[in-house]
Image (tube, rainbow, N blue to C red):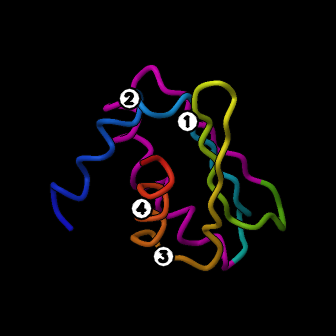
Amino acid sequence: GGRAAMAWRGKLAGAVAELRFHFCQTGPGSQGARDFVKASYKDLKLKNPQLPILVRECSGTQAKVWARFGKGVEKSASLEGMDAAGVDKAVQALVR
């Protein structure tokens, strides 16, 4: 936890071309993803002003994060059923 755990956020723009969050506005499985975006979006944008961070809300969607890297490479990770801390870890692992 703490500051060291947040350090990865400042390195996003160099590693990732785009970050996309997909989740359901109301589904319980998306609660952690919603909480993470609500709590962290501002911080992520502040530290990575050039990085597109997209949020797609769609009814019935499974919570997922997509990262686009150079040369059009995309990777995704399921966030379904995670709490906000789990989402933070999953995003961090995805963008490494």
Give me the residue at 48% from left, 76% from top: 83
Q: Nearer the viewer, residue 16 or 22?
A: 16
Q: As shown in the figure, which amino acid type bears the numbered disc 4?
A: Asp
At x 54% / y 76%, what residue is drawn? 82
Circle 4 — which element? helix
Asked whether the beta carbons under mark 4 and mark 1 sit within 8 Å of each other, the answer is: no
Instruction: Estimate the x, y position of residue 25 in percent, counting from the top left.
Output: 71, 62
Q: Quadrant of the N terminus?
A: bottom left
Residue that sits furthest to the left in the current view: 3
The answer to whether marks 2 and 1 mark residues whose Cβ atoms lie closer than 8 Å is yes
Q: CA distance from mark 4 to mark 1?
A: 14 Å
Residue position for label 1: 53
* Magenta residues, dominant SS class: helix
| Alpha carbon separation for disc pair 4 and 2 | 16 Å
Instruction: Establish if 3 lies above or below 31.
Output: above
Q: Which span of residues is magenta-colored?
A: 28-57
Q: CA distance from mark 3 to mark 2?
A: 24 Å
Q: Residue at x 45, y 72 (%)?
A: 86
SS class, disc 3:
loop
Q: Who comes first in sequence, dot 4 or dot 2?
A: 2
Of the numbered discs 3 and 1, the one sitting upstream in the chain is 1
Whole-angstrom CA distance, mark 3 to mark 1, is: 20 Å
Q: Earlier in the sequence, mark 3 or mark 4?
A: 3
> Is 42 within the magenta?
yes
- x%, y% of residue 36? 46, 60
Q: CA distance from mark 2 to mark 1?
A: 9 Å
Look at the numbered disc 2 and give the secondary structure of its residue: loop
Q: Looking at the rendered structure, which numbered label has been put on residue 48?
A: 2
Tell me where residue 42 sits by quadrant.
top left
The residue that disc 3 covers is 83
According to the picture, the residue beneath numbered tag 4 turns out to be: 88
Mark 4 crowdedness (10 Å alpha carbons): few <14, some 14-19, many ≥20? many
